[in-house]
């Protein structure tokens, strides 16, 4: 997974939310799938970076309420809005976005889609198609739903982030039968690539957060695969997303990046990255001059 020489598994100084130039003190943040896992860690990271206008959605109202209470207790001066909604429910998601814009008194500055579904890790020929297809409902339809809401309620120049997976770009491996997850996330990344091209005023970025085994999805992958995963610290992607939302990461517009890549190395190549087709999904070896 090397793109930078240095590969991170834990948060580090250059992406610390406490850095002044990464401050989100004036920004409104909306996190889809923010009640648990990476979404919750990301919410904490944005609060640490200074944002005091935070909106969260999640499917499980009890979990969402508990998370909001925890965040509010830690940052009592913040406004934390919650709306229970499934990411694939367009009416519910749009209602949540509309409420946040109204409550915050203006359009949203950062939208993070951290919702995801991981179908069972079973071979395509022997898995139930309903469970397999559920990944597409969340990871693809959900991507489109959130993108449409961002187009309607986000500020001009807002940052829209979609959490993808490295599995979307790796060759298939019969020992790890994850076609439902990898294919749906691959499609989700492409949906967001088109959304970014169609809305040049927005900065759209897809991010592989790493393998975070302490999340519900991470634990499920470990259990179902039977493999040993080293695992990444949950705060690595959380802090990386704060950096992605900053002006410093502007050169990543419409790109697909990994949270473990070193940001100083990325910045050193920012012109090359911004002005080339690097970090965009494509067909290896095509086009070719023959």
Image: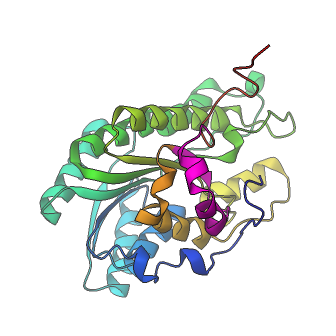
- Picture layout, residue 12 above or below residue 111: below
73 in the magenta segment: no
Query: Where residue 194 sits in the image (x, y, percent)?
Result: 44, 31
Residue 262's image quarter? bottom right
In the image: residue 75, left or right of residue 219: left
Residue pictured at 80% horizontal, 34% vertical: 171
Depicted 83 relative to depicted 182: above or below: below
Residue 255, can we see it? Answer: yes
Q: Residue at x 59, y 40 (%)?
A: 276
Seen in the picture, residue 254 relative to 259 is either above or below; the reply is above
Q: Position of residue 207 (x, y in %)?
A: 56, 52
Most foreground residue, 16 or 87: 16
| Residue stretch rendered in magenta on the structure | 255-277
Q: Tell me, yes or no, if residue 92 can be seen here.
A: no
Instruction: Say which of 80 and 48 sits in front.
Output: 48
Q: Is residue 8 shown left or right of residue 28?
A: right
Residue 214 on image: x %, y %: 66, 67
Which corner quadrant holds the C terminus? top right
- Is residue 271 rendered magenta in the image? yes
Pick the front one: 218 or 100: 100
């Amino acid at each position: 997974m090397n793109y930078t020489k240095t590969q991170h598994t834990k948060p580090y100084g250059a992406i610390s939310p406490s850095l002044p130039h990464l401050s989100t003190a004036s920004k409104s943040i909306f996190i889809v799938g923010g009640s648990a896992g990476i979404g919750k860690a990301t919410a904490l990271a944005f609060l640490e970076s200074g944002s005091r206008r935070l909106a969260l959605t999640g499917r499980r109202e009890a979990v969402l309420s508990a998370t909001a209470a925890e965040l509010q207790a830690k940052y009592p001066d913040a406004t934390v809005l919650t709306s229970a909604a499934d990411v694939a429910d367009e009416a519910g998601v749009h209602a949540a976005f509309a409420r946040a814009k109204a409550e915050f008194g203006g359009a949203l500055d950062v939208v993070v889609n951290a919702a995801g579904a991981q179908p069972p890790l079973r071979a395509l020929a022997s898995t139930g198609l309903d469970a397999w297809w559920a990944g597409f409902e969340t990871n693809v339809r959900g991507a489109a739903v959130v993108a449409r809401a961002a187009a309607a309620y986000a500020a001009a120049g807002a940052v829209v982030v979609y959490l993808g997976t490295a599995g979307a770009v790796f060759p298939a491996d019969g020992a790890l039968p994850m076609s439902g997850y990898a294919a749906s996330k691959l499609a989700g990344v492409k949906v967001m690539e088109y959304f970014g091209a169609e809305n040049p005023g927005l900065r759209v970025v897809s991010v592989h957060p790493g393998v975070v085994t302490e999340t519900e999805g991470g634990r499920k992958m470990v259990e179902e695969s039977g493999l040993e995963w080293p695992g990444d610290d949950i705060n690595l992607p959380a802090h990386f997303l704060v950096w992605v939302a900053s002006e410093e990461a502007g050169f990543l517009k419409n790109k697909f990046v990994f949270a473990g890549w070193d940001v100083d190395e990325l910045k050193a190549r920012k012109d090359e990255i911004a002005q080339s087709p690097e970090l965009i999904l494509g067909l290896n070896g095509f086009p070719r001059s023959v």
